[in-house]
Image (cartoon, rainbow, N blue to C red):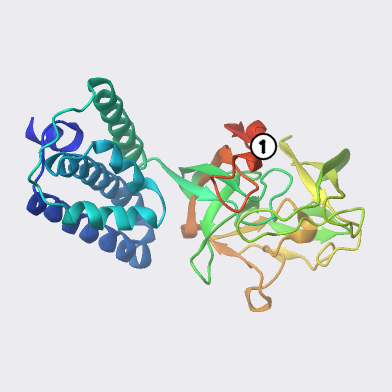
Amino acid sequence: MPFLTALFDLNGTATRKQALRVFLVLLLALVSLVLIRAFSPSAGRFADPVVGMVVVWWFATMVRRLHDAGHSGGWALFLLVPYVGVLVAIWVLMLRGDRPFNNSHAGLRAAGTAGLVLMAVLSLSRVFWAPYWSASEAMKPNLLVGDYLVTRYAQPENLVRGDVVVFRHPVTGVPMVARLIGLSGDLIQMANGAVVLNDAVLGQADAGMMTEVFLPQGPMRLLPRCTNGVVGIGGRCDLALLRETLPDGRSYLTGNLGDLGFADTTDTFTVPEGQLFFLGDHRDNSADSRLAQAAGGLGFVPAENVIGRVTRVVFSSAGTYLWQIWDWRGDRIFKAVE
């Protein structure tokens, strides 16, 4: 089939005109995706798979373009390198096609085709899930800075208290993650660090300490906050943990820096119709629904802003860049989220 051949066949050649045509389609697809995300975010789940398939088409075309200029298609791997990939794409488009390359390795071609098929499958599966990158400590200890998450699309009516949810901020529209605590009509209050849900205090039990090295984490080089106070770089940073239990028996860990946090005691909130109430698991380090939007907090979140439920961490890195393999957290790969 010509369509499948264009997507996955790494044999043969592609002229400069053919490659330029695919490049323009790619630019159009990327611009369309930006506009869709800006004006109709919920439609992004259907636009992402289309753009992913165009990227697969573009990559295969660039391999054939390299062949047309007498070079190995292996050079196309540099297209995957941030920033460098743009320069490589321009170089490939400018190559003269007068020395067709006929010495490609069958095994490498098969591996490349398999990689493109995998990329296509992942792109099409984006109809059902979305990626999310955790950039703050607000959900520690369950989510860490540098966690890459799988978010399964979900309707608000299918969510339950205790779910970890990705949603669009009601003011900025930026995706955020927090734990769903209150549904429409619920009464919620914080009393000395404990959650009071519909006049029932959620149980909290001591769950020990989370210990880590006091070092900058993630691209923003955030320093962790510690229960044991200010420590020096490279020192031991402890975070006291509590296990909180919902009325239905579901439980999860929360972080506690102390008993006099900035929002450990609040007035009673009544969650309006069509709105949701979220808390960060790191209760003393999260500007969540306890704080009004005018004060820099989250406030109530419209149910329509929900993107989906977080199911697991797929990858995690504490480093500034992903290539810093010494900062990868191997114990968090494919880790389920409580």
Asked if 73 appears above or below 78 in the picture, the reply is above
Task: Determine which quarter of the picture holds residue 4.
Answer: top left
Residue, far top:
107
**Could you tell me if residue 253 is visible in this image?**
yes
- Does residue 185 show up? no
Q: Is residue 104 left or right of residue 87?
A: left
Residue depicted at 71% across the width and 37% down the height: 248
Residue at 48% of width from left, 66% of height from top?
Answer: 173
What is the count of numbered marks?
Answer: 1
Q: Nearer the viewer, residue 29 or 284?
A: 29
- On the image, the x and y values in percent for residue 265 come to 85, 64
Residue named by callout 1: 338
Q: Nearer the viewer, residue 251 or 239?
A: 239
What is the secondary structure assignment of the residue under circle 1?
Answer: loop
Quarter of the image for the C terminus: give it: top right
Q: Outermost residue toward the bottom?
A: 294
From the image, which quarter does the N terminus lie in?
top left
Pointer 1: residues within 10 angstroms few (<14), some, or many (20+)?
Answer: some
- Residue 81 spot, x, y in % from top left: 40, 49
Q: Identify the residue at image location x=66%, y=31%.
A: 331
Q: Is residue 168 above or below residue 3?
A: below
In terms of depth relative to the viewer, which is nearer, 189 or 281? 281
The image shows residue 321 at horizontal and vertical percentages of: 56, 51
At label 1, which amino acid type do we have? Glu
Q: Along the line of sight, which residue is nearer the eye, 240 or 251? A: 240
The residue sitting at 54% across, 43% down in the picture is: 149
The relative height of residue 236 versus residue 305 in the rendered view (above or below) is above
Q: Is residue 133 above or below residue 6?
A: below
In percent of width and height, residue 213 lies at: 80, 46
